[in-house]
Image: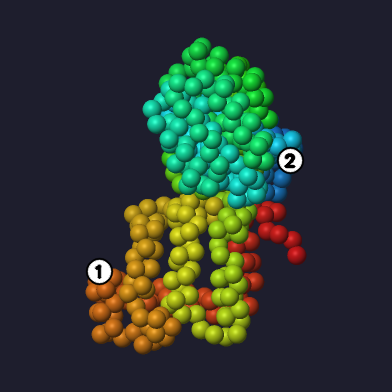
Amino acid sequence: MFENLTSRLSRVLDSVRGQGRLTEEQINAAARELRMALLEADVALPVVKDFVDHVKQAALGVEITKSLKPGQEFLRVVQQQLTETLGGKAEPLNLRQQPPAIILMAGLQGSGKTTTTGKLARLLKEQEKKKVMVVSCDVYRPAAIEQLRVVAGQVGAEWFASESGQDPVAIAQAALAEAKRQYVDVLIVDTAGRTTVDEAMMKEIAALHAAITPVETLFVVDSMTGQDAAKTARAFADVLPLTGVILTKVDGDARGGAALSVRQVTGRPIKYLGVGEKSDKLEVFHPDRIATRILGQGDVLGLIEETARKVDQDKALKLAQKLKKNKRFDLEDFREQMLQVQNMGSMESLLEKLPGGMQLQAQLKNVDADKQMRRTVAIINSMTMQERRFPDLIKASRKRRIAAGAGVEVQEVNKLMRQFETTRDMMKKVASGGMAKMMRGLAGRLPPGMMPRR
């Protein structure tokens, strides 16, 4: 996500980091590089100008030029301005009203509205514990209504049936009446998209908005369209009272122009990011965390939250208790850890949230970590339970049988055993109090203030 922008900004910051004193000439040179980096990221020109002007103004101030660590202060200024440009703080959905709270989804064709409707329904259902109903008012696109029915089934949301040829306003009003009857907390209305911003489309969605008065009107836009995303969002904002934006396909956006332009161009906050195709790949947009990710400092808080949601807490507790009792970490435990990591998503998305994750990704550029993890699980699956519990039993003849069962070479089994032994040694350290040392080591790689206080 935003790899190109991260790479360019990292080079700019490296040029000033470690300097004993920053001169005006160095700051001007860094500002020029910042401008080029943002323009290459397809950020809207007014946003680029405003961003660079603010950074220069702060960098030429007393706090930078007379600082003992000017490089770190310059990083702080850039991070602060990035956070401000992205919106300052997270702005959650406003669902504090008499149920059902209505959310209207707007956007162009192909932006991912229907898929995002399903993702949002799942997020509200699982994280906010809401009863959610979805309805499609897209009576033009073939199979649009059926697509939403399937998506609703996948995420466990209520679905209100509609048909092609019906009036979109009538569909929405009927869905609202049914949502009230079923005591639904949130009704999400998916609307028709077009290939361009045309007058007929705008009139229809404006009439729809007037008929149901949604508490949230969200504009769904493909982030890979760069600053065009911001221009389209502004065109919608001129007609509809938008309350927020959802950027989709962010996982495929190496530039980041849309994220940096939308807030300033439209005056509307980004509320969510679509970071993958699966229904759980919708993230709340935190400007401060995205700023640290863009600057290559990771998103440790986001990683902790994701771990808390997706890791089986009961299994994690059982393993911790087992290690405390000095019972040995075995291959079955190792397999369970692999499955837990797989459940959290791709290795690439996890590395993005670690400080220095970009460098780690570069080192693993030609390595398919997810494929290797699946292979590891397959090899352990071909072992007997006795072999998993007592790894020392696995000698040459057993390795040949295990390799044949998993469809791999014996060298792959040997490689797995070495990885397991390294992990087992690490687990011993954790069980004997080594976790504190590991956390102190991690703290040295985090930005100031990121580690929790005792």
Measuring 57% from the left and 80% from the top, which residue is drawn there? 323
- Residue 63: which numbered mark, if any? 2
Measuring 70% from the left and 49% from the top, which residue is drawn there? 68
Q: Element at badge 1?
A: loop
Front position in the image: 257 or 322: 322
Q: Element at badge 2?
A: helix
Identify the residue under disc 1. Answer: 407
Quadrant of residue 342 within the rendered picture: bottom left
Give the x, y percent position of residue 401: 25, 79
Above or below, 416 against 208 in this view is: below
Give the x, y percent position of residue 219: 56, 28
Above or below, 94 against 361 in this view is: above
Front position in the image: 341 or 425: 341
Q: Amino acid at mark 2?
A: Glu
From where the camera sits, is residue 62 visible? Answer: yes
Count residues near mark 1 (Cα–Cα under 10 Å), then give few for <14, some for 14-19, many for 20+: few
Above or below, 327 against 268 in this view is: below
Give the x, y percent position of residue 246: 56, 34
Image quarter of the C terminus: bottom right
Left/right of residue 428 with respect to residue 59 in the rendered view: left
Measuring 56% from the left and 42% from the top, which residue is drawn there? 158
